[in-house]
Amino acid sequence: MTVQRTFSIIKPNAVKKNVIGAIYNRFESAGFTIIAAKMMHLTREQAEGFYAEHKGRPFFEGLVEFMTSGPIMLQVLEGENAIQRHRDLMGATNPDNALAGTLRADYADSFTENATHGSDSEESAAREIAYFFTADEICPR
Ligand code: DGI
């Protein structure tokens, strides 16, 4: 087991539901340490850049519209095997397939409005963390 960092977003629909604290509680209860955090309201350019790999997909425009529709919370989570354990805590991308007790089962409204984001590999974690955080905004214990 290795200590990893992963990038997390609490998406606009979950921020609107006022469940930032509830989700932070779930992160901490699952053994993650929040080592960076900030709230942002993304511009179209920021959202398109973040999801550039999906450009051209049928859901891309709706995804960008949603991700710019309101404020989001951005976090860096640290912990043992954090990337996969955070994906497990979130549940399946399509909330219809998310297991009971996962964040998406509890807070998603649709496939697009699926409440949270989490990096899916070490490469994407490094890219996504650097996309939103400078080195001095990351505060390990
Ligand atoms: O890493 P994930 O967020 O689990 O999934 P992803 O990187 O494949 O897709 C990014 C986001 O795009 C996902 O959280 C929701 C949305 N998305 C992906 N595939 C579809 C989709 N939205 C719709 N409506 N339909 C899709 O097939």
Image: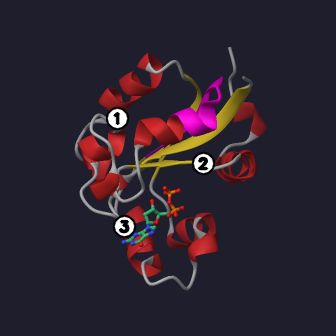
Question: In this rendering, does residue 38 appear at all?
Answer: no
Q: Which residue is located at x 39 percent, y 51 percent?
A: 11
Front-most of residues 65 and 77: 77
Considering depth in this image, is 23 or 101 the residue closer to the camera? 101
The residue located at (47%, 38%) in the rendering is: 88
Residue 70 figure quarter: bottom left
Label 3 crowd bin: few (<14), some (14–19), many (20+), radius 10 Å: some
Magenta segment boundaries in residue numbering = 73-85
Residue drawn at (63%, 72%) of the image: 53
Which callout, 1 or 3, points at the residue further toward the start of the chain?
Answer: 1
Percent of width and height locating residue 139? 68, 24
Instruction: Point out the tag, 2 or 1, that comes first from the N-terminus.
Output: 1
Q: Give the quarter of the figure containing the C terminus.
A: top right
Question: Can residue 118 be spotted in the picture?
Answer: yes
Mark 2 sits on what residue?
119
Q: Which residue is mark 3?
A: 66
